[in-house]
Amino acid sequence: MAEEIVGLLARRHSTAVVLFHHAIAERLGLGPTDHKCLDLLRERGAMAGSNLGAITGLTSGAITGVVARLERAGYLRREPDPHDGRKQILHLALKRAHIQDVINPLREDVAALLENFDSHQLTAIAEFLARTTDLVYRHAALLRAETISTMGRTPMTEQAPSPASEKVSERSR
């Protein structure tokens, strides 16, 4: 049973969630990265753009673009950091509260689904979700660190040949 959960069900769930969030982002006129950065601000509260970059692994240039798009769309506002004039603190400015309108139908369906479980099952579900979320964040950070480390030691062109370069070397044989 555990193998089926890890091998098939978790992967299918993950894919469905990613596709759902892409659809939400599209509906809100955002990119998927913009939408998830907005989610991080909703979950963790106001923070500097550099902190958001550290959490997501996005470059400072990418964060600048995300912040500009979210600000233009009315989802966040920037304020100077009172302790460091070089930084700006990102705050939610959810003028466009229709985010909840887009997400609520799924929330209502999940709540109805959860009504079929007893308190022990709900506790297990909550624990599973909390613990796997922590694992996913940890493994994302590990993968990011390994990628950065590998990129620092070996140029991208030496890591893996591209399909085009493999065709060229086959022709030259």
Image (cartoon, rainbow, N blue to C red):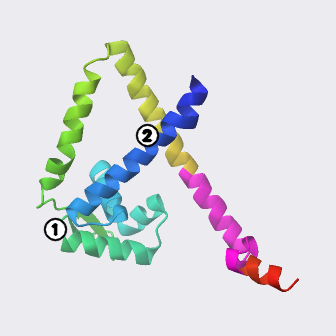
State the SS at label 1: loop
Whether 95 is drawn above or below 78: the answer is: above
The C terminus: image quadrant: bottom right
Q: Residue at x 28, y 60 (%)?
A: 25
Most extreme residue toward the right, as rendered? 173
Is residue 40 visible to us here?
A: no
Q: Residue at x 74, y 79 (%)?
A: 167
Q: Residue 8: give x, y in percent of width and height.
A: 54, 36
Is residue 69 visible to us here?
A: yes
Q: Residue at x 21, y 61 (%)?
A: 28
**Nearest-to-viewer mark from 2 and 1:** 2
Q: Residue 151: give x, y in percent of width and height.
A: 67, 71
Kind of residue at disc 2:
His
The segment highlighted magenta reads 140-164
Q: Nearer the viewer, residue 18 or 55?
A: 18
Disc 1: CA contacts within 10 A as few (<14), some (14-19) or many (>=20): some
Q: Residue 153: give x, y in percent of width and height.
A: 74, 72
State the SS at label 2: helix
Q: Which residue, given by chain and number where applicable, does mark 2 sit on?
A: 13
Horizontal side, residue 99 vs residue 53: left or right: left
Q: Which residue, given by chain and number where applicable, does mark 1 sit on?
A: 74
**Residue 27: which quarter of the image?**
bottom left
Whether 160 is drawn above or below 141: the answer is: below
| Residue 26 part of the magenta segment | no
Q: Residue at x 66, y 60 (%)?
A: 146
Q: Main secondary structure of the magenta part?
A: helix
**Residue 64: which quarter of the image?**
bottom left
Kind of residue at disc 1:
Gly
**Residue 84: which quarter of the image?**
bottom left
